[in-house]
Amino acid sequence: MTMSCQSPIEFAQMSDIRQLARLLAESLFDDPLQQWLFPDERGRLAASARMFRRLLKSKIAEGMVRVIRDRSNLVASAAVWTPPYPPAPSRWEHYAESLFMRWTYGKRIHEVRRGFTALANRHPREPYWYLQALATTPAQRGEGHAARLLQEQISLCGSTQELMALETSQFTNLAYYQKLGFQVEHELLLSENLPVWLMCRRANT
């Protein structure tokens, strides 16, 4: 009898950036928060992919992107994390981020910044691991990859007694994360019809 083996969880590589950015942008295309960030449906995919490429470049360098690959060695599922004590951005990085936001959001930059500030202000005051993005390719959904990526970090945080946090603007995601021990700690109405839930998982959950 042959035993099936699961693909290992790996660190993402710089060569994965374009594929990962496309995966995240496509997976979150209909996400309410992405729709708020990029209201123009025709340009949303490209704009979202640009945003994720920028994010992934630093996250992969820091070892904060974990992936599971398919049989063709392409990324099947990915999780992007921010650690409790992320590296402080340099003055140049602050400047580059400001330019990028102005180019990306144009006249909406102040609205978007207010939204980001409102989201950040209700984050935990204690150190925590933050799940920035989680996505799986359509062909690989239902294989348990996302749960494995989460369980890996849950195990790590359990051994170190560290808090985990994430945000979702999809009501249907709440039950999924609750099964993994996350609980809703705050609901923010980012705009008239856009609730965003902050969920946390404590090490003793």
Image (tube, grey):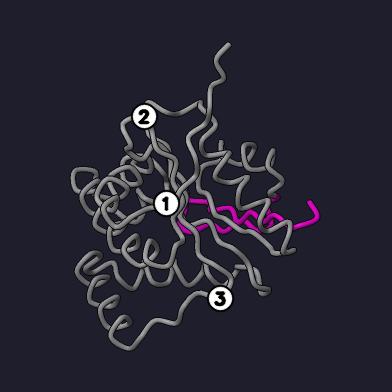
Q: Which residues are magenta?
A: 183-205
User: Dots 2 and 3: beta carbons under 8 Å?
Assistant: no
Residue that badge 3 annotates: 85
Rendered location of residue 145, percent (x, y)? 51, 35
For discs 1 and 2, the disc positioned in front in the rendered view: 2
For discs 3 and 1, the disc positioned in front in the rendered view: 3
Q: Dot 1: within a 10 Å radius of its alpha carbon, few (fewer than 14), some, or many (20 or more) residues?
A: many
Q: Earlier in the sequence, mark 1 or mark 2?
A: 1
Is 189 colored magenta in this rendering?
yes
Q: Secondary structure at mark 3?
A: loop
In this rendering, the answer to whether 192 lies above or below 87 is: above
Q: Magenta span: helix, strand or loop, mainly?
A: strand
Q: CA distance from mark 1 to mark 2?
A: 32 Å
Drawn side of residue 85 relative to residue 27, left or right: right
Q: Quadrant of residue 89?
A: bottom left
Q: Earlier in the sequence, mark 2 or mark 3?
A: 2
In this rendering, the answer to whether 164 lies above or below 32 is: below
* Residue type beneath disc 1: Leu
Residue that badge 1 annotates: 33
At 52% from the left and 31% from the top, the residue drawn is: 6
* Residue type beneath disc 2: Arg
Residue that badge 2 annotates: 71
User: Dots 3 and 1: beta carbons under 8 Å?
Assistant: no
* Residue type beneath disc 3: Tyr
User: Dots 1 and 2: beta carbons under 8 Å?
Assistant: no
